[in-house]
Amino acid sequence: MPKANRSALVALPTALLGVIGVGCLPAPRWETETPLFTGIVVRGDKPVAGATVLLNTEFHDSGCANPLERATTDDVGRFELPAVTRFRAVGWLIGDPLFDWSICIAADGAQFPGHFGGDMGNLRSRVPLRCDLENQRREPTGICVESE
């Protein structure tokens, strides 16, 4: 057998073992990292207009220092944060992906921890939230509760 063919026969299994051992493979794709968030911001029973709702993909970041998405509540306190998608050049072969997010709310000169959460595997397409600025039960998931 020529030397070039023997090298190819050794290189291919070695590369395959390397991919399996590391658990990832070049597989370029767009990956959705958060669901669509819809909801309402209230103070007690009254809607809060003009509040800023921030979203990032760092779990339990109560300051939302680097938001990837932001929305402003309308006259009846409603908001919608689009799903965050990112381009990935490499994909994992084993295990389910983990997704984390933090939502923060800025209103009336104060910042509130909105919702901290995550999913494993397949993301839900939409998460409806009701965020009450008077909610004192802020930990561990923030002032927002899932609704509907």
Image (tube, rainbow, N blue to C red):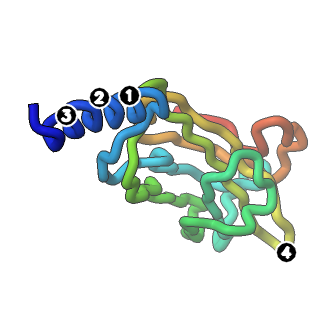
Q: Earlier in the sequence, mark 3 or mark 4?
A: 3
- Residue 10 placement (x, y as % from top left): 27, 32
**Amino acid at the residue labelled 1:** Leu
Q: Earlier in the sequence, mark 3 or mark 2?
A: 3
Q: Nearer the viewer, mark 3 or mark 4?
A: 3
| Discs 3, 4 touching: Cβ within 8 Å | no
Which residue: 85% across, 42% down?
138
- Mark 3 surroundings within 10 Å by alpha-carbon count, few (fewer than 14), some (14 through 19), many (20 or more): few
**Amino acid at the residue labelled 3:** Arg
The residue that mark 1 highlights is 17
**In the displayed image of the protein, which residue is found farthest to the front?**
2
The residue that mark 2 highlights is 13
| Discs 3, 1 touching: Cβ within 8 Å | no
Answer above or below: position of 94 versus 104: above
Instruction: Determine the secondary structure under disc 4.
Output: loop
| Discs 2, 1 touching: Cβ within 8 Å | yes
Which residue: 10% across, 37% down?
2
Which residue: 86% across, 68% down?
110
Q: Earlier in the sequence, mark 3 or mark 1?
A: 3
- Residue 36 placement (x, y as % from top left): 45, 49
**Amino acid at the residue labelled 2:** Pro
Question: Disc 1 to disc 4, how far (Cα)?
Answer: 56 Å
